[in-house]
């Protein structure tokens, strides 16, 4: 039986720093969704809590227009198409139900060794595909090279570590807690892991690692400034994100810029959606690793749409580990 109402989260005001209780507004609206021709009603099961959600709140030039005040907050998700009932990825934001055009619904069959939630994790655009594209297409990692990954315990970084090991690289992770360091080294197989909050981490890095060939940058700021000084000549930097800048706080910007010239570095930012032609092959490879059990994934699940702000702040305070997911609906419940 269809519900009489459903919940959605709309952008109420643009935050200046961390999101707060005024950023989003919870709306409970009548369930009067009726699909027209070439449309479907989708029940959202999980939303992906990604740093880029904070970026979409900013009224600034970006790769997508900002979410407008009063609009449902944009987010990736997976759900069940109520009609005809197949599972689908969707892009319509933080709400329990949505009416989508057919071309906005990406139907899929769950692969062996995978679960529905994995289509926001290793098989998802903002985690697994981002890690794969940034490492292999942008970073062009090769066997025997040394890779440095910032935010190595995060949704993307934790997969980059594992993909790089499969490519035969020496992997160096940078994290923010000793617990994360143990997980990245003991469970994910990184060769070296450094806690950037340790007063000696840069000295330890120099002694133990030396120089790197590829840097997968998720954070920017002073961590990246240091890594730029530890790159081999003709090294490559794959810039996935700059999480330290998303909240509008003052940062020193790119330091040690001269190293790009002196070491002839290639620095490339990327947006994963620019590589749609690569998704099929990347997905097949990741799915095969999931099927044979050689890829580990960790989910930090927060329950309820109303807790999305708390979930998002976990990302920016470094209190999550692995892929952060918002559980929206029970997949086994009726419509």
Image (cartoon, rainbow, N blue to C red):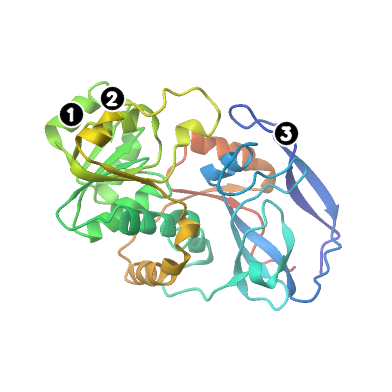
Residue at image position (37%, 44%) is 153
Per the image, the residue denoted by label 3 is: 13
> Of helix, strand and loop, which one carries label 2?
loop
Of the numbered discs 2 and 1, the one sitting upstream in the chain is 2
Camera-near label (3 vs 2) is 3
Work out how far the residue at label 3 is from the one at label 2, CA to CA, in angstroms.
Answer: 37 Å
Are dots 2 and 1 in contact, CB under 8 Å?
Answer: yes
Between tags 1 and 3, which lies in front?
3
Disc 1/disc 3 C-alpha distance (Å) = 44 Å
Q: Where is residue 275? Give x, y as percent.
A: 44, 62
**Looking at the image, residue 110 lies above or below residue 262:** below
| Image side of residue 64 versus residue 37, left or right | left
The residue where tag 2 is placed is 198
Q: Position of residue 122 (x, y in %)?
A: 42, 60
Q: Is residue 89 above or below residue 259?
A: below
Image quarter in which the N terminus is found: bottom right
Question: Residue 204 — which label?
Answer: 1
Q: Split into 4 quadrants, where in the image is the C terminus? A: bottom right
Q: Residues within 10 Å of mark 3 (few under 14, many from 20)?
A: some
Residue 214 in sight in this render: no
Q: How many marks?
A: 3
Is the Cβ of the residue at disc 1 closer than 8 Å to that at disc 3? no
Give neighbour class at mark 1: few <14, some 14-19, many 20+ (Cα, 10 Å). few
What x and y, as percent, mark residue 135? 32, 54
Which numbered disc flags the more N-terminal residue, 3 or 2? 3
Dot placed on the residue nearer the N-terminal end, 1 or 3: 3
Image coordinates of residue 101 in percent, x first then y, are: 71, 69
- Horizontally, residue 308 falls left or right of residue 108, namely right
| Horizontal relation, residue 289 to residue 214: left or right | right
């Amino acid at each position: 039986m269809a519900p009489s109402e459903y919940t959605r989260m709309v952008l109420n005001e643009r935050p200046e720093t961390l999101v707060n209780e005024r950023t989003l507004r919870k709306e409970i609206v009548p369930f009067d969704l009726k699909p027209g021709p070439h449309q479907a009603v989708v029940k959202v099961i999980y939303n992906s809590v990604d740093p880029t959600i904070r970026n979409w709140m900013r009224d600034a030039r970006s790769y997508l227009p900002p979410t407008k005040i009063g609009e449902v907050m944009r987010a990736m998700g997976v759900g069940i198409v109520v009609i005809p009932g197949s599972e689908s990825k969707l892009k319509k934001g933080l709400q329990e139900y949505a009416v989508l055009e057919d071309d906005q619904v990406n139907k899929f069959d769950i692969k062996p060794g995978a679960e529905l939630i994995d289509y926001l994790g290793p098989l998802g655009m903002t985690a697994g595909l981002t890690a794969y594209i940034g490492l292999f297409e942008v970073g062009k990692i090769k066997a025997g090279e040394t890779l440095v990954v910032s935010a190595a315990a995060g949704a993307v970084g934790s997969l980059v570590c594992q993909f790089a090991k499969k490519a035969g690289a020496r992997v160096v992770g940078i994290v923010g807690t000793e617990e994360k360091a143990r997980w990245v080294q003991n469970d994910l197989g990184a060769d070296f892991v450094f806690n950037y909050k340790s007063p000696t981490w840069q000295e330890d890095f120099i002694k133990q690692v030396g120089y790197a060939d590829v840097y997968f940058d998720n954070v920017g700021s002073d961590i990246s400034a240091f890594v730029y000084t530890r790159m081999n000549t003709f090294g490559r930097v794959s810039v996935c994100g700059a999480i330290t800048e998303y909240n509008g706080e003052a940062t020193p910007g790119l330091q040690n810029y001269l190293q790009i010239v002196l070491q002839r570095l290639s620095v490339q930012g990327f947006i994963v959606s620019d590589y749609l032609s690569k998704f099929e092959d990347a997905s097949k490879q990741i799915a095969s690793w999931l099927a044979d059990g050689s890829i580990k994934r960790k989910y930090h699940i927060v329950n309820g749409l109303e807790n999305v702000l708390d979930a998002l702040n976990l990302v920016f305070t470094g209190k999550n580990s692995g892929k952060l997911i918002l559980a929206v609906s029970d997949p086994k419940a009726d419509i």
